[in-house]
Amino acid sequence: MSVSTQGAIAHFCSFPPLRKSCSGVDGKGTLTYCCSSAKGILLAKDFFHEAVKNALVKAGWTISHDPLSISFGGVDMAIDLGAEQLIAAEKGQEAIAVEIKSFLAQSSAISEFHTALGQFMNYRRALQQWDRERVLWLAVPLEAYANFFRLEFPHLMVQEN
Amino acid sequence: MSVSTQGAIAHFCSFPPLRKSCSGVDGKGTLTYCCSSAKGILLAKDFFHEAVKNALVKAGWTISHDPLSISFGGVDMAIDLGAEQLIAAEKGQEAIAVEIKSFLAQSSAISEFHTALGQFMNYRRALQQWDRERVLWLAVPLEAYANFFRLEFPHLMVQEN
């Protein structure tokens, strides 16, 4: 798992939204996104899902799977999104799988991080077998990225895995 | 993460209980446990916690932490149990940390496995820094161990991590 340098972590919107429109993919392949509206904390999970989808589409990706289902080794898994983008005619398609974690305020960040890390390890391993070219991204809210993920321990785990 | 050969996974009781008393640690250091009573699914989490504690005590361990709290790199974590046992006078204490996963029927096994793997990776890394001699165990119900953990994918992830 790596942060912006390899585009493995896409960080998107804070909740509640910071400002109206600031989606895009930077030079390092890191997805950043700020939300334009919010309908309440109970809808936050679906809201994040839509926010990430919209940000990817705005950045030129085509959503190919919603969700991306994988069956491997007796287990069924579902990664939140699959997306594809034409890099250059001769190079063909670039493909990603995106797992979206909402890091909602009412649950503790470390609990979400346990699950996110486990999902990331499992999905990456399954993709190795199922679609070796597809790169796995983890999408987290900008607020979680700017605060929790900068702490020493999460930073270390992201670097080491 | 490894299964019985290194005692990293302790598997305990099925829910509902199979038979009255069959706790113990086998020759490979694997904790097995069957429950003697159950008070309903809502209490299952506490019930498992007590079942594992009792099994450890019966196997000669002294519960030293309940929970075992670790602060490292800006994050507070709590592993379910810490336990110690005198191996031999000259060798001193053997120490373990035990994370208990209930794999309750209403949640999907793969979801619990994502969280279990993430917790295991995070706790093992934190223990490396905090108490290098303490070995991390993951306690799962006998039923989950006998069914889900024998599937190809979970088995592979346990072997590789």
Image (spheres, coloured by chain):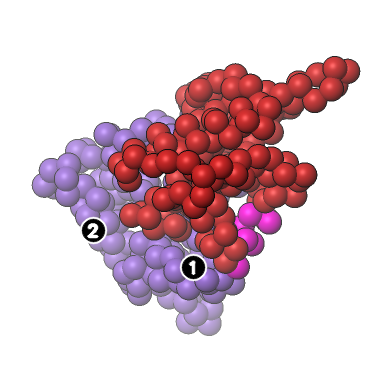
Chain colours: A red, B purple
Residue B109 position within the rendered picture, expressed as x and y whole percent measured from the top left: 39, 34
Position above or below: B65 against A2 = below
- Indicate the chain on which mark 1 is placed: B
Q: Identify the secondary structure beneath mark 1.
A: strand
A107 relative to A131 in the view: left or right: left
Q: CA distance from mark 2 to mark 1?
A: 27 Å
Q: Residues within 10 Å of mark 2 (few under 14, many from 20)?
A: few
The magenta span reads A152-159
Camera-nearest residue between A34 and B8: A34
Residue carrying label 2: B50
Instruction: Reply yes or no: does residue B45 show up in magenta.
Output: no
Label 1: which residue?
B75
Q: Is residue A102 above or below residue B65?
A: above
> Residue A155 in the image: x percent, y percent?
62, 61
Of residues A48 and B30, the one nearer the viewer is A48
Query: Residue type at mark 1?
Result: Val
SS for dot 2 = helix
The one of B20 and B3 positioned closer to us in this rendering: B3
Depth check: give the residue in front, B114 or B64.
Answer: B114
Left or right, residue B20 beside residue A39: left
Q: Residue at x 11, y 47 (%)?
A: B39
Question: What chain letter is assigned to the residue under label 2?
Answer: B
Secondary structure character of the magenta stretch overall? helix
Residue B59 in view in this figure: no
| Quarter of the view holding residue B58 | bottom left
- Residue at left 19%, top 38%? B16
Q: Is residue B106 left or right of residue A61?
A: left
Q: Residue furthest right?
A: A90
